[in-house]
Image: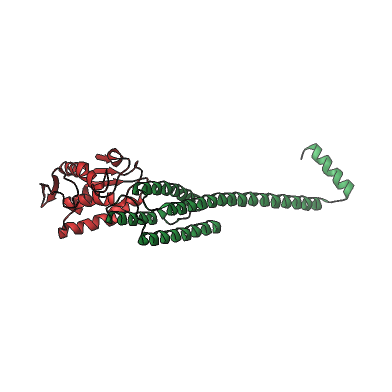
Chain colours: A red, B green
Amino acid sequence: MNIIKIKDFSEYPGLRSCNISEKSGEEFYHEKFNSEFKLSVENKEKIQIDLDGTAGYSPSFLDEAFGNLVYDFSLDIVKKYIEIKSNEEPHLIKFIENEVYELWETKRKKNTPIKVTKDHRPWWRYINGEFIMQSIGVNVI
Amino acid sequence: MNILEVIIFNFYTNTTGLDNSDIISIIGIFVDIAIAIGLVIFVNIKISQKSRLKDFFIDDIVALRNEYNEYTNLISDGQTIQECSRKAKKINSKFAILNDFILESFKMKIPQISEYQFQLLTKIVNIAEENNSDKVIYNDELMMVVEEFHNKINILFTEIICNVVKK
């Protein structure tokens, strides 16, 4: 199983967007999460996200990181391949699974435009059973 | 009975004029008294152990309630969100440890304050991000939410203390 420890990304995760804070959920998603998750889906193996070991989370960091994942890969795929570990703050798992997932699946179905606050390298989406590369320029300053 | 006991027994019966049934009754009375005293001491020890345990937990619960109150009092303009979430995590982990001990000692489930705390943090973050800031913006809306949380926490902790006392 592939394991991502968020503390390796930062011991002090930031807020939602790159234009507001360093080490944001947006940055984590585009630098690490998107490509690692794509790799796991391709290899048909689960990926574990370990939330322990950081100084604490802003809810918006988690919303942006896990939300974008649902938006790009769909809720079914995310539920199938992801395992969230949080022994220190188990309520975070509840928050992600009960609130973030549903909200972003709705955004995905409605094709609600996402906010991008920094130029990122192209990232993966899973549409109609195929991986496609996508790139959106900064649309929020 | 050995020889010595037979001699003592005969001595008592001869000198006091008590027959065997009287002596058995007297011994019975002494045994009853001994059992009663033992029972009282045992129950007393048990009660005082439980009471000490309750006092210990209540002190911890009160200390934790004060920490949550302190946390809400420290939320102020300009404080970084990371600082808020760091402190929240620290208090919540203390609460989780206390929760485990209370569950084990009193078989009592207590409300998960970390979830309320997370709702408060969500509100703090939403207000800050709406204003493109990574710092707390303590406006009227946030002030109301903080007060609401403060009251909710105090009610919850009072309920927890009452329930521990009742156990």
Residue B13, percent across and down?
A: 85, 47
Count of number-bearing discs: 0
Q: Residue at x 20, y 41 (%)?
A: A31
Residue B53: image location, x then y, percent: 56, 49
Left or right: where B157 falls relative to B88:
right
Between B115 and B130, the residue placed more toward the observer is B130
Q: Quadrant of the N terminus of chain A?
A: top left
> Camera-side residue: B73 or A40?
B73
Q: Name the residue nearer the viewer: B161 or B39.
A: B161
Q: Quadrant of residue B127?
A: bottom left
Horizontally, is A54 left or right of B152 in the view? left
Query: What residue is rendered at 30% in x and 49% in y?
Result: B134
Q: Position of residue A98 (x, y in %)?
A: 29, 56
Residue B23 in the image, given as x and y percentages of width and height: 80, 50
Q: Residue at x 65, y 51 (%)?
A: B44
The answer to whether B64 appears left or right of A37 in the picture is right
